[in-house]
Image (cartoon, rainbow, N blue to C red):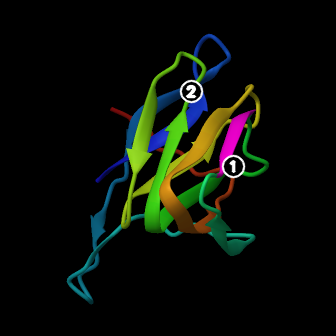
Amino acid sequence: MRIVRFGEGADGTCHASEVEITYAADAATGLAMSESLTSDGMQFVTLPDGFAAGLHPSAKRRVLVVLRGQIEVGVPDGSSRVFGPGDSFIVDDAATSGHTTRTIGGAVEMLWVAIPDTAVWRSV
């Protein structure tokens, strides 16, 4: 599975890239699963209608999942990505000037899951 990651690029600014989440087969259950990560926190968050934040880094490395609504996340080069219900992405840009965020067409409900610094995914 591929997922968008907002993280530090070679130039030290935040960039969007895709990373590959790999799976391994579990013979006991027949499920394909990624590595298990320990989280030090999980929050449900609502961004209100009209919410817009200029460049800001994430306080923690997180996987974010959009539950309801649409959100646009931008990077300093002016490009952006739009995410809707069921979409997930990683914010990993604490060492940069960060990303922009705005809601599109109403409030956005999200799940934020903190992930450890040891989690590593291969860029594609």
- Taking the view exactly as shown, the residue that stands out farthest to the bottom is 28
Give how far across and how far down residue 97 sits, in percent: 74, 26
- Taking the view exactly as shown, the residue that stands out farthest to the top is 11
Q: Is residue 7 above or below residue 104?
A: above
Q: Is residue 105 above or below residue 10?
A: below
> Observer-nearest residue: 96 or 23?
96
The residue lying at 59 percent from left, 33 percent from top is: 7
**Left or right, 33 with reference to 45:** left
The residue lying at 40 percent from left, 44 percent from top is: 82
Mark 2 in CB contact with mark 1 (< 8 angstroms) = no
**Image quadrant in which the C terminus is located:** top left
Give how far across and how far down residue 78 sits, in percent: 52, 19
Mark 2 and mark 1: Cα distance apart in space: 21 Å
| Residues in magenta, as a range | 51-55
Q: Is residue 35 visible?
A: no
> Observer-nearest residue: 20 or 77?
77
Give how far across and how far down residue 30 sits, in percent: 20, 83
The residue lying at 73 percent from left, 72 percent from top is: 41
| Quadrant hosting residue 86 | bottom left
Report if residue 7 lies within the magenta region: no
The label shown at residue 94 is none
Q: Secondary structure at mark 2?
A: loop
Q: Secondary structure at mark 1?
A: loop
Q: Amino acid at mark 2?
A: Val
Q: Amino acid at mark 1?
A: Asp
**Left or right, 31 with reference to 118:** left
The residue lying at 69 percent from left, 74 percent from top is: 43
Q: Is residue 121 visible?
A: yes
Q: Residues within 10 Å of mark 1 (few under 14, many from 20)?
A: few
**Helix, strand or loop for the magenta stretch, by majority:** strand
Q: Which residue is mark 2?
A: 75
Q: Which residue is mark 1?
A: 117
